[in-house]
Amino acid sequence: MAYTAVELIELKRDRKTLPADGIEWFIDAYTKGTVPDYQMAAMAMAIVFNGLEPDELAAWTAAMIASGETLDFSEIPAPKIDKHSTGGVGDKISIPLAPLVAACGVAVPMMSGRGLGHTGGTLDKLESIPGFEPRIDRARFGEILRDHHLVLAGQSDTMVPADRKLYALRDASGTVASIPLISSSIMSKKLSEGLDGLVLDVKTGSGAFMDELEESRELARTMVGIGAKSGVETVALITSMDQPLGNEVGNANEIRESVDVLKGEGPEDVTELTLALAEVMLELARIDGGRERLLDAIASGAAFQKLKDVAAAHGGDVSVLDDTSLLEVAEHEAVISATEDGIVSRCDALTIGLAATRLGAGRERKEDDIDRGVAITLAAKIGDEVAKGDPLAVVRFNDEEKWSGQRDKLASAWSVSPDAAPPRDLVLERIDTSQI
């Protein structure tokens, strides 16, 4: 053995460069249990304070990928492009985006996650479709991708096991807030998919993991740099998460809104962000036509049909997509109303996301169950004019005690002023390899 855990921890503690083979040994030993949690926690804390240089970060990410199986779908001739979002409130974009792009000739091997805290998870929303099963083995993953150019699955137990261990440890050791550790966690999972290109939706604002633009910019640049060093063309869009995306926050109701987008009837912001990300995915796939091609796929019904076909391949009952009134709806309804006349100057994503979570639409612990009928439907967002008594949101819930505890907190998400500036642009910046 060329290294010991202690000497590598001391190197990073003392702000020195970790050798690539030392990183490879450390991650492998941690995955196998030779390096215990307390030593990995010490290394993670050293990285929190001292960071990782680009070459170190590339080696760290590569070692994470090498800790488990990788996917190879080179036999599928279509370009393989995926998208990842850093998470937000009302962020159902993957659900209309992936079938839309697949309908235009891109193969999308999308592996998504579950929600934790105030941000929703794509898999939780998809499981609002009765029978939908995201947990599939590698053979079935490949079969669905070959047949439909799209998979909407969860990460398997055999892919990037080092990240699974380290993710839980970071949460318990106060080392979550580290851009090198965040970016390597995200990119190791995505780069294990055998991609030709990757689009990143990096959120910024109150409902985002990074609420300051400069932090979001640094995270985006770091992930684009990892992609470049790994030979996968990567583009990031930094997008606003000051208020929720769309009008629906929850699970089943976000499926309804996703279907609306694929039918050309969705809210303006969700539709625009879906199209903006889809354009970049087509660009990376070297497929011509851009927005016009995407709009044609919506108008023809091809994009919606792709969602139905893939949902059926995952075991889902697609009758709820044809008639979204069949999706789950919570028993009770309440309205949050404006208390004065004016223009909405604030519709805080974090406050709304936390309320939805605590009503049962999300989970505060990994073992919590999701109530997919819980829904917050926004009736007014930033820039909208309201009169006293007008609805700001309609809330559906099953647990009256939970609602009594969240009613006033949810109402505090809105501010109304005599005048107000419009919301900031949805897409704030694009970052690609020319900017790192």
Image (cartoon, rainbow, N blue to C red):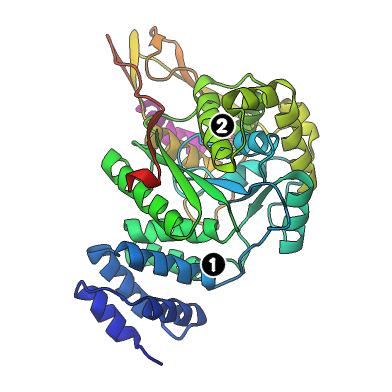
Side (left or right) of 135 relative to 179 = right
What residue is at 43 percent from the left and 33 percent from the top? Answer: 352
Q: Of 116 and 199, which appears nearest the observer?
A: 199
Q: Is residue 370 magenta?
A: no
Give the residue at mark 2: 375
Residue 257, x across and y down, in percent: 61, 27
What residue is at 58 percent from the left and 28 percent from the top? Answer: 290
Give the residue at mark 1: 160
- State which region is magenta: 397-414
Quadrant in the picture for residue 361 = top right
Q: Quadrant of the N terminus?
A: bottom left
Side (left or right) of 47 relative to 300 = left
Callout 2 secondary element: strand
Q: Of 308 and 233, which appears nearest the observer?
A: 233
Crowd class of label 2 (few under 14; some 14 to 19; many from 20; radius 10 Å): many
Q: Is residue 412 magenta?
A: yes
